[in-house]
Image (spheres, grey):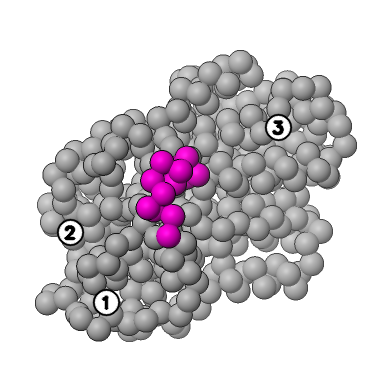
Amino acid sequence: MKAIGLALLVCCLSFQISAKESLKDYWELSEYLALHPEQVPLTETFAVTVQNDPVPLTQLPKKPISIAVIYPAEQISDYWRRNITAFEARLQALNIPYTLTPYYTKPATESREQTQYLLDALQSSPDYLIFTLDSLKHRKFIERVIGKGKPKLMLQNITTPVKAWQARQPFMYVGFDHATGSRMLANFFQSTEPTPLKYGVLYFTPGYISSARGDTFIDAMGNDELYQMQTAYYTKANRQSAYTAALSALKAYPKLDLLYACSTDIALGAIDALKELGLTHQVKVNGWGGGSAELDAIKAGEMDVTVMRMNDDTGVAMAEAIKADLSAQPTPLVYSGQFAIVTSQTPESQIERLKQRAFRYSDHPQLLATQSAAQVTNP
């Protein structure tokens, strides 16, 4: 399905086809582990390592390792920025000397800009490249890097191995499983909301995240009379386009009970629309990720629920994977972090405990050593 203009209204049948066509190319983590049982103990041991205190590397590399990071960090969601902070903090706690070159873009950025960043990153011949996968263009580039065998590639924000790559997989997939989080949100609404529940979906841009978060939510809600998907729009993955899409959805379907948002920026755009229409307490909105902006919106009574990632664990996982690699120790192919449901009814004390766990490094920048061990540049 292609977006036409700012937003595209598509029917429920089209979504079901899209989900099958988009997600069939990936193994869900449980499927992958069933096919590769040797990965199970690696995955379990590594998860414990991520939660434990750091154990510094004893055999240091002869020179600092070089890392290039290309992230869609220019957005309201603080996931990507927190991830880098936690990553660096753990690298330094592990006594790993490194240089880091980050390239930050907007979500759904022009492919020309992103391609240039990728070329710039590769020209420096980094030891590790950290990137993401949300489109066919991403996938084609990744396949070229995997084919060359270097740099070692970590794919961030995806936990479902690509079937076609088989034995030629990247060094690691790391993130919070989109399908798991979306099913948790579906279960929350099914268990707490009166029926029939009429809802609309505000997608990300066309691609993997929209399928994994949006289509999975629709599938989990089911197609019976209890939960009725009325409308859906693709956005440009930013607040303004989500605001426009939400206004359109609410104009066409004024009796919606819920706007399901596929990301933080989209949720905040939907909230803007509800404020303008005076519907803040009539139409529910979810968050996706549980970063600072979402928790503030929940506290203000503007957002009803989010699925909160234990954010910093993925940054820790990336650092621990590099440590294991430098120590010639095996690493699992996939690390998937944990979630918690947070609602407008969650006690503030519980939210604070979750924040202490989720932001254990990124809320405490003093844990970062002086930058003497790291040369940080940003084009």
**Where is mark 1, residue-wise?**
96
**Residue 40 seen:** yes
Distance (Cα) linking label 3 and label 2:
44 Å
Amino acid type at circle 3 is: Met
Q: What is the quadrant of the C terminus in the image?
A: bottom left
User: Residue 345, relative to residue 232: is it above or below?
Assistant: below
User: Residue 208, relative to residue 268: is it above or below?
Assistant: above
Where residue 262 appears, x then y in whole percent? 58, 40
Q: Residue furthest toward the right?
A: 194
Q: Residue at x 24, y 48 (%)?
A: 117
- Mark linked to residue 221: 3
Q: Which residues are magenta?
A: 29-41
Classed neighbour count for the residue bearing mark 2: other residues with Cα under 10 Å, few (<14), some (14–19), many (≥20): some
Let me know if residue 37 is in the magenta part.
Answer: yes
Amino acid type at circle 2 is: Pro
Please, what secondary structure does the residue beneath circle 1 have? loop
Where residue 297 appears, x then y in whole percent? 69, 56
Instruction: Pick whichever, 257 or 170, lies toward us.
Output: 170
Which secondary structure class fits the magenta region best?
A: helix
User: Which badge, 1 or 2, is on the more N-terminal residue?
Assistant: 1
**Mark 3 in CB contact with mark 2 (< 8 angstroms):** no
**Where is mark 2, residue-wise?**
126
Where residue 331 appears, x then y in whole percent? 33, 60
Where residue 275 appears, x then y in whole percent? 75, 43
Q: Residue at x 76, y 41 (%)?
A: 189
